Image (spheres, rainbow, N blue to C red):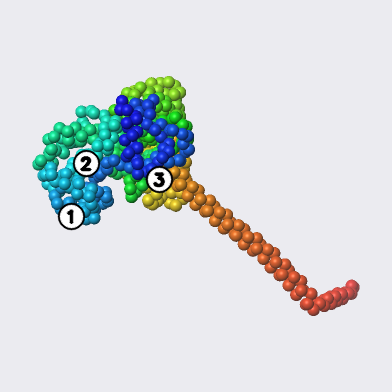
């Protein structure tokens, strides 16, 4: 294991610009894996633990990415004429083309002779983050060598493939060794977009190495989360929960709402280790049942959950009837549910998806399942951009319901503060304020209506009283009517 003391010394040099004289962390021996960051004092929930700046940063430049972004300031460029005119093979804006950073990059890559310098090549642009390690000073390069690097059979492939894009790529073994080591460190604890972490932390679209963050170990229920300053790309790590002195500060390498099986598979393939945290050791995942499915026995109402064997295809056990099902059998149910929900999500009708989640999906997949959670998060994201074909009432009710559903899952898992929780709580607060305002306005309307009705009733009474008084007055003013004269008595008739 690399000496924690030497690592700490190099990290102090790297973080010197922040001038933190009393850091809340120290590098120490970890119970999780090798070394990690330990809290040197009690840290309150929401408190900033540390700031970190990238030792290396550049464009991710995956094949599917747009390549018209400046290799220095990382901002998007116009679709035409964005390549360096000197012939280094890098995209650069007119302002950054005069900066020292680009001159250093340009001199290095131009000396290697790009085959097609006028054409944006994702392999060359992606290599830049690695190539910049060659221009670091000794302490900075030593810091890279102090960081964890999984030296598998694939970490040499990137540099080997990049060499084919140049006419005079260096053959010096030392250069190859430095670049290969940098690739291994980036693959192990660097950033290469945050597609696997966007549930909990701020999305980050670059390839970068943050040395202090790279020392942090993984936990599926992390006690910290991070965001980035937009202009500087400085990372800010905050406490998700109260962290007692001496406890390890952890982050997560995976999405929070991914089930045990998928997380195990990702960590094994991409990170090279098997997580044994409290969540991974619990088939119910703290009672959140994110991987839960319905029992195949139609007479049983229980949930089945995967065994925590760490295998890629574990069996499932029913928590009620104890029936065991194979992975293949349960994946049929999972795939059917995913397919049905995805079909609704791709139907271009948000209202159809919401109605399906509210009324039908629970018939064949539990609402706790990660497929449903991801769908609800997707709905909330779309509603944030506009309510599409949803009525105002449906959109408001959906924002309230889904925000509460996801927060409830986070509480069940024991997750503390995070970017997604903050966003959901803000959404919930705004929607509750809007609803309270609407209810208050409706109550005010009802009050005014009742007031008007009362006044109308009072006016009707007054009008009736006035009409009655007028009739009485009219009757009193009228001349008396003479009594009719009595009818004459009938004349007597003589009888014979």
Determine if residue 495 is in view: yes
Please give the name of the residue rendered at 34% of the width and 30% of the height, measured from the top-left corner. 5
Please give the name of the residue rendered at 29% of the width and 44% of the height, measured from the top-left corner. 205
Check disc 3: other Cα within 10 Å, few if <14, some if 14-19, many if 20+.
many
Q: How far apart are marks 1 and 2 (CA)?
A: 28 Å
The residue at the far left in this view is 167
Are the residues flagged by discs 3 and 2 in contact, CB closer than 8 Å? no
User: What number is the disc on residue 380?
Assistant: 3
Query: Which residue is labeled 1 in the image?
Result: 81
Q: Distance between the residues labelled 3 and 2?
A: 45 Å
Name the quadrant of the N terminus. top left
Are the residues flagged by discs 1 and 3 in contact, CB closer than 8 Å? no
Check disc 2: other Cα within 10 Å, few if <14, some if 14-19, many if 20+.
few
The mark closer to the camera, 1 or 3, is 1
Q: In this view, does 352 lie above or below 486?
A: above
The mark closer to the camera, 3 or 2, is 2
**Total marks drawn?**
3
Name the quadrant of the C terminus. bottom right
Please give the name of the residue rendered at 16% of the width and 44% of the height, measured from the top-left corner. 109
| Image x and y of residue 282, in percent | 42, 25
Query: Which residue is labeled 2 in the image?
Result: 135
In the picture, measured across the screen, residue 470 lies left or right of residue 407, that is right
User: Is label 2 in a helix, a strand or a loop?
Assistant: helix
Q: In this view, does 251 lie above or below 121?
A: above
User: Is label 3 in a helix, a strand or a loop?
Assistant: helix
Q: Nearer the viewer, residue 310 or 166?
A: 166
């Amino acid at each position: 294991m690399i000496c924690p003391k030497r690592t700490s010394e190099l990290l102090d040099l790297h973080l010197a610009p922040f001038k933190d004289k009393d850091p809340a962390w120290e590098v120490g021996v970890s119970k999780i894996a090798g070394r990690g960051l330990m809290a040197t004092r009690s840290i309150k929930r929401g408190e900033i633990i540390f700031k970190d700046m990238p030792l290396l940063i550049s464009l991710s430049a995956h094949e599917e990415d747009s390549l018209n972004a400046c290799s220095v300031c990382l901002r998007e460029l116009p679709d035409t004429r964005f390549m360096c005119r000197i012939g280094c093979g890098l995209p650069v804006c007119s302002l950054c083309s005069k900066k020292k950073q680009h001159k250093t990059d340009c001199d290095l890559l131009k000396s290697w002779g790009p085959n097609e310098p006028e054409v944006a090549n994702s392999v060359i642009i992606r290599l830049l983050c690695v190539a910049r390690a060659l221009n670091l000073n000794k302490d900075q390069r030593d810091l890279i060598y102090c960081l964890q690097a999984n030296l598998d059979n694939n970490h040499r492939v990137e540099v080997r493939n990049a060499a084919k894009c140049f006419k005079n790529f260096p053959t010096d073994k030392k250069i190859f060794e430095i670049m290969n080591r940098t690739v291994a460190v980036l693959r192990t604890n660097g950033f290469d977009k945050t597609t696997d972490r966007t549930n909990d932390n701020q999305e980050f679209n670059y390839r970068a190495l943050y040395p202090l963050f790279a020392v942090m170990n993984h936990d599926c229920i992390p006690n910290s989360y991070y965001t980035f300053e937009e202009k500087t790309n400085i990372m800010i790590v905050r406490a998700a929960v109260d962290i007692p002195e001496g406890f390890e500060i952890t982050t997560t390498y995976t999405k929070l709402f991914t089930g045990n099986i998928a997380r195990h598979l990702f960590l094994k393939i991409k990170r090279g280790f098997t997580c044994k945290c409290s969540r991974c050791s619990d088939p119910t995942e703290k009672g959140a049942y994110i991987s839960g499915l319905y029992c195949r026995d139609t007479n049983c109402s229980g949930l089945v959950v995967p065994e925590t064997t760490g295998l890629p295809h574990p069996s499932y056990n029913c928590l009620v009837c104890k029936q065991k099902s194979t992975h293949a059998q349960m994946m049929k149910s999972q795939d059917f549910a995913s397919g049905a929900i995805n079909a609704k999500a791709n139907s271009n009708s948000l209202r159809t998806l919401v109605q399906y989640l509210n009324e039908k999906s629970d018939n064949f997949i539990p609402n706790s399942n990660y497929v449903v959670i991801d769908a609800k998060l997707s709905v909330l994201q779309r509603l944030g951009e506009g309510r599409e074909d949803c009525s105002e009432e449906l959109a408001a009710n959906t924002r309230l319901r889904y925000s509460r559903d996801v927060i409830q899952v986070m509480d069940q898992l024991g997750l503390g503060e995070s970017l997604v929780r903050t966003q959901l709580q803000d959404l919930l607060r705004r929607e509750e304020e809007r609803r309270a305002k609407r209810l208050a306005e409706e109550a005010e309307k009802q009050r005014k209506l009742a007031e008007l009705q009362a006044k109308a009733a009072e006016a009707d009474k007054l009008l009736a009283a006035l009409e009655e008084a007028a009739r009485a007055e009219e009757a009193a003013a009228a001349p008396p009517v003479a009594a009719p004269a009595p009818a004459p008595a009938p004349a007597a008739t003589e009888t014979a």
